């Protein structure tokens, strides 16, 4: 039995076809991945929660129409209230404002003490070994 080996060099046309085919496969997989992620988002998203776990819609108050029409401005008989979270945020902001110089000052100088020879610039690890 005799085997015939054919040598064929790749032409520029073959290389162009292979490049375009590879790029096409990559982009096709990326598009499919986007659709898979969108599908997972729809399946496991928060949109299909039961009505019991959704927050309730605000109930309109039973105030008279005249009370709703008058704009409430601060100091016009309305009392402004803050929640505990808002009070904590205000207290933290005031604390940070008045104690701004607590941190130590930096010298803005980079120092590097060389302890000994290191491997990153060693001649033996060069990219190309020149033989003489």
Image: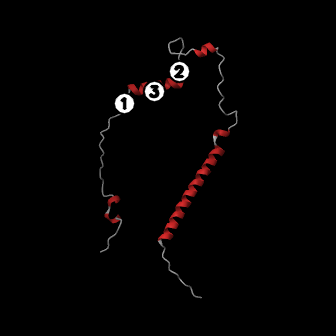
Residue located beneath label 2 in the image: 82
CA separation in Å, label 1 and label 3: 14 Å
Residue at x 52%, y 15% (from the top left corner): 73
Residue at x 49%, y 69% (from the top left corner): 15
| Percent of width and height locating residue 97 | 39, 26
| Percent of width and height locating residue 23 | 52, 61
N-terminal of the pair, mark 1 or mark 2, is: 2
Kindly indicate whether the residue at mark 2 contacts the one at mark 1 (C-beta within 8 angstroms).
no
CA separation in Å, label 1 and label 2: 29 Å
Query: What residue occupies the far bottom of the structure in this picture?
Result: 1
Residue located beneath label 1 in the image: 102
Residue 1 image-quadrant placement: bottom right
| Other-residue count near label 1 (Cα within 10 Å), few / some / many at <14 / 14–19 / ≥20 | few
Query: What residue occupies the far top of the structure in this picture?
Result: 77
Horizontal side of 100 relative to 48 (left or right) equals left
Residue located beneath label 3 in the image: 92
CA separation in Å, label 2 and label 3: 15 Å
SS at badge 3: helix
SS at badge 2: loop
Query: Residue 69: which numbered mark, if any?
Result: none
Of 3 and 13, nearer the camera is 13
Q: Reply above or below: 50 against 21.
A: above
């Amino acid at each position: 039995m005799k085997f015939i080996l054919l040598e064929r060099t790749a032409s520029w046309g073959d290389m162009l076809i292979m490049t375009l085919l590879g790029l096409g496969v990559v982009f096709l997989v990326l598009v499919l991945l986007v659709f898979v992620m969108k599908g997972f988002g729809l399946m496991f998203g928060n949109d299909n929660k039961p009505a019991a776990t959704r927050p309730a819609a605000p109930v309109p108050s039973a105030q008279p129409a005249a009370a709703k029409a008058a704009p409430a401005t601060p100091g016009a008989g309305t009392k402004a209230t803050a929640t505990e979270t808002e009070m904590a945020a205000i207290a933290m902001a005031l604390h940070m404002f008045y104690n701004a110089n607590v941190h130590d000052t930096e010298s803005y100088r980079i120092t590097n003490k060389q302890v000994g020879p290191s491997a990153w610039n060693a001649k033996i690890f060069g990219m190309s070994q020149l033989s003489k």
